[in-house]
Image: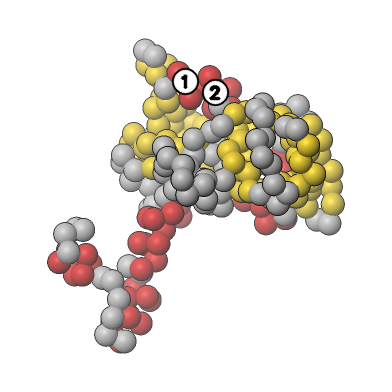
Amino acid sequence: MFTGIIEGVGKIAGKRITGGGIVLDLEAGFSLIEPKEGESIAASGVCLTAYAIHDNRFSADVSPETLSRTKLGVLGPGDYVNLERALRLSDRLGGHLVSGHVDCLATVVSRKELGNFTLFSFSLPRVQDRYIIEKGSISIDGVSLTVNSCSSGLFSVSIIPLTLKETTLGALKVGNKVNIEVDVIGKYVAKLLSPGVQAAEAAAGQGINPGFLAKHGFL
């Protein structure tokens, strides 16, 4: 698990095709203190398993499934990614719970400067917008952000200067693609409240439904 609080930007130093996927060689812009072979490191929101770790460099395999869901496949040597090492139980949860499992790609629709802040609007597949709520959490290229507004197939976020400076989001332009992970809690709630699950649990005399949530103050 991750928090969406980026530790630093990394550069892709190499890219190789292998077994239907690719291998990325990455160079972190910060020191990998006490590195462990096989640890999880998120690259622009994608959970990867790091190996061949040396100083601030490491390699990671990217599977065909990951390539189909994320933008890592179109990146190459010289491109930059946001990096975050996995959350430790003793760490502060500064952002929100991020699994590193990207749901879809979104496209930058607009970028507007509003004083010291930058307002981005994104479009994304309609099947994913049900999990996005106003003032809810969302991960964009691994960065934990708060949703300003949302509508059918669209949402916007307001980004502070520090985030633009310290992550790859500052370089985003209209038409660029970003990795999106919606709030994992929203996905679980949506599944629990789906008609099929409710019917099965009702038949078994158990489960969570709108009545249960309302009774206990969640609705």
Report the amino acid beneath label 1.
Answer: Leu
Q: Is residue 35 above or below residue 169?
A: below
Report the amino acid beneath label 2.
Answer: Glu
Q: Is residue 159 above or below residue 219?
A: above
Label ID, residue 166: 2
Label ID, residue 162: 1
Name the spot of residue 189 as percent of width and height, x first. Answer: 35, 61
Which residue lies at the image location 63% right of the left edge and 40% below the top edge? 43
Q: Nearer the viewer, residue 5 or 129?
A: 5
Q: Is residue 126 left or right of residue 210?
A: right
Q: Outermost residue toward the top?
A: 115
Q: Is residue 44 above or below residue 169?
A: below
Tag 1, which secondary structure? helix
Mark 2, residues whose alpha carbon is within 10 Å: few (<14), some, or many (≥20)? some
Which residue lies at the image location 39% right of the left edge and 55% below the top edge? 185
Q: Is residue 211 above or below residue 160?
A: below
Tag 2, which secondary structure? helix
Mark 1, residues whose alpha carbon is within 10 Å: few (<14), some, or many (≥20)? few
Q: CA distance from mark 2 to mark 1?
A: 6 Å
